Amino acid sequence: MALSRRGLLQLAGAGTLAGADRLLGAFGDMFRPASPLGAATQVITACGVCSPACGIKATVENNALRFVEGLEGDFSGRGRLCGKGAAGAGFLYDPDRLKYPLKRTNPRKGIDEDPGWVRITWQEALDTIAERFGDARKRFGAESLLFVTLPSPDVWLRFMNAIGVVNRIDHIDECFLTDRIIQRYTTGFKSWCNDFENSKYIVLFGWDILAKAKLVYANGIIDAKDNGAKIVCFNPQYSTTARFADEWYSIRPGSDLAVALAMIHVLLAENLYNKEFVDQYTNFGEHENTIRTHFAQYTPEWAERESDVPAEAIRRIAREFGTQGPAIVPAYKKTLCANYQNASQLVHAISILNILAGTIDRPGGRYVARTPAVPGIDAIVPPPPYPPKQGRRVDGKDKLPLVLQDGGGMFSTLADGILNRYPGMIQAGFIMNYTALSFPQPQQTLDALATIPFLAVMDYLPTDTVTYADIALPGTTYFEVSDIMARDYYARQPQYVARTAVVSPLFESRSPGFVALELGKRLAPDYFKNPDGSWINLNAVLDERTKRLGLGENFAEFRAKGIVTREQAFVPRTTFNVPGTTKCQILVPQFKDAGGDPLPVWRPKREIPSAEYPYYYLTYIPAVHKRNSTQNNPILNEMMGTAVASLNPQLAAKLGIREGQRVRIRSRVGEIELPAHLTETVRPDCVLVPHGFGHRSRLLQTAGGKGVRDGDVIPAQSIQQCVDSVNFAGSSCIMDAVVNIEAL
Amino acid sequence: MSERLSAPGDLAVWFAAVGRVLASPDAAAGLRVMAEGLAARANARSGVREELAALWAEFPGDPQEAHREYVRLFLSPGAAPCPLWQSAHGDEPQLMGPSHHSAIEWYRSEGIEPGVENEPADHASLLLVFFAHLLDSGAPAEWIQRYWREHLAWLPKVLARIERETRLPFYARLARVTRERLEEAEAFFRETPA
Ligand code: SF4
């Protein structure tokens, strides 16, 4: 369009814009004289869809994001973005975004209730939240406050610590909690770094690395193969990675532990482990007899009966694993740490395999990121001593000492805690960036949330949980905030990328940091002041972080560089930061003290097929989505907008199910109905359903009402069930379900 | 319909008023003063005076009711998704999409820009007030036609949806009359030689 009508106003004799009478002010109220146009600029920032935070080059014009592309030299994305990252503008510019703070006027809560929102100011929203939380704390103690949020940004954590919060819950029991706990006591570190490129043998239990489309890992595994590594894959699904792998075994769901135990058995029985590493850096010598005796029972023949993987294959794979050069068994998030009731034991067995391979913090193995962490706000402005944490834990994690010590929360037990264990205890709740779909039995969670007298929810979209809020706060997307991203997924040498606010926050959205600071000022002012008595300024804190890391005098200087990489040789660790020792632990006495198994013991998964529920229920996260947070993105929704149940044709024939026919999948806790898709890639005793669909909020115009919630058939749990089943590192059992399937 | 139209300026009065009302949940509450002032300037034969008075008569006694309905319809669309950003209605619904940039170009051609920076420029309220300005300032018919095509053609359908979905006679009337007036304006300029 080429318009050149400037001055028409004057020509037409209609007076000036500022004129009081100009359409009686409508014009002057809404428009102002144009300011000079800026040229399009390129800004370096970092993706915020998933945690490797790939570097982005963003083209910005007139405060609008026009284009995103990968950033050369970045360790995470290596100059590329995955589909989710490339579709990033769809998050920033989602028409359904929460735009202004809203207050509920309809006291009835339900997924189909109209909340009767009215728009309020931030001032009113923050004052109301502070008042309700302050009041609940005064009358019922800190235990009455529930925060469903990650502990980041760290000013949030400071706020929660300052008011003595004991009930901060997050999703990591569905993610990496189990691995973090086990790693702490076996190798001393939880790391995201897997040196696939230098590995010669990679064993994957379940993790569909390629289809997950996390670039940093996908690149790593492709490089590994180029470099001659052998890749072995155990998965009940013939996954994308299975196709790419050298060998694939259709393993019985939940029996990975049996195969891992048998691999350890072979490595020990045939002395194929890395003797030098094991002797020098582990507690094997102290407990050799116990360890050897323990694993003697787990023969490959036994494992074959549990897993359907041939004994000969297990034996050969173990031998190759022990002899073909650097070997690794990566453990990853939802894929296994959280899937089954025996995840604590599985992750422990996996850690032992890596220790026996001698690749802990060695080339070709799991290693500690070399990028020094960004200094926390408490290091920059030391707070007064925090009040002691007193009160009951609504998720019951105090029953699992290692989980309590870890500090992460448990989604899988939250609803039981609110509804059954401690009814009425929670008086005020704050949920940030989580929707009900994140939980097993999401409706039960929503029902639990509905019992909380006051609920505030912050998100950038009007999710199902927002529908239950008394106050809804519009959050920012990653394009609207600034931060320092320390590389921790690929970090053999330090690297930092500047996450830069490429546009100012849309509408009245604000960052979580802003909310923490403002609530902090109202509820615990002493913790939010500088030594001179002025309020903490988060930009000043960011400048100071930048300076302490040597990235620049202030953030603006670092932002101008965008990315900083430091040359540094990779020097393997010789001491390990394990509690009570400097060595890696194969046998972990602390696990016994905490009611767990000091050495991994075979334990079956929670749900075993029965006459009533004869089939395994498997879920997965499609490549084009990130959990349940991306389905409303128009581009990603177009790529995959709803859920189908994948079934093997053999099973379909037995049940009389045709392609596309609707099926009912029922477990002991619920049922879902969705179309069937027939595929040879799933075992005939399983059904596979994607996670992330079934948003109910009508406010989500793209995703709302499409597909079903996979969690509706996945049983949540009580903390007592975790204790009774020796699920001592708190796995949420997020895939531990069996079902009945019928044609409709 | 076009025989009722005495001058584009009368339509401008209606669109300016509606544009202003649609700007925020509480804007309607301030409508009365403006509506009366605007109506006084409209040509008696255009019917705009009466329509504004009739619209005002529908305004609920409790302004909160209008506020809630605005939020339900336009900000958190409940059962009735009627967002007022043009680009939310394109083939690829997205804020700050091509229609935002095109609207900015139109405004800048008049030496102006929206008063609020961090919101899309293709909100119906801005588009309608700017349309009022074009009409009021005697812009050539071809430009008006082009503006209508580029920035208002999507609106009648959304107004029809508002009319169906709203629980308040006030918004139903506002939507209906605005839709009719938009169609009227479009027809008028289509018939007017450039
Ligand atoms: S892998 Fe994709 S979604 Fe994850 S950070 Fe990189 S570009 Fe973003």
Image (tube, coloured by chain):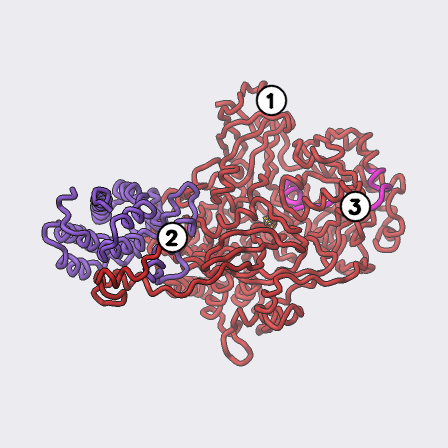
Pointer 3 or 2: first along the chain: 2
Secondary structure state at the residue bearing disc 3: loop
Which residue is denoted by mark 3 in the rendering?
A199
Which residue is denoted by mark 2 in the rendering?
A2
Q: Is residue A182 left or right of residue A685?
A: right
Q: Is residue A509 left or right of residue A362?
A: left
Chain letter, red: A
Which stretch is magenta? A318-340
Residue A379, quarter of picture: bottom right
Which residue is denoted by mark 1 in the rendering?
A649
Tell me if mark 2 has few (under 14), some (14-19) or many (20+) residues whose alpha carbon lies within 10 angstroms of its own.
Answer: few
Amino acid identity at mark 3: Ser
Image marks 3 and 2: residues in contact by CB distance under 8 Å: no
3D distance between C-alphas at marks 2 and 1: 59 Å
Colour chosen for chain B? purple
Chain letter, disc 3 residue: A
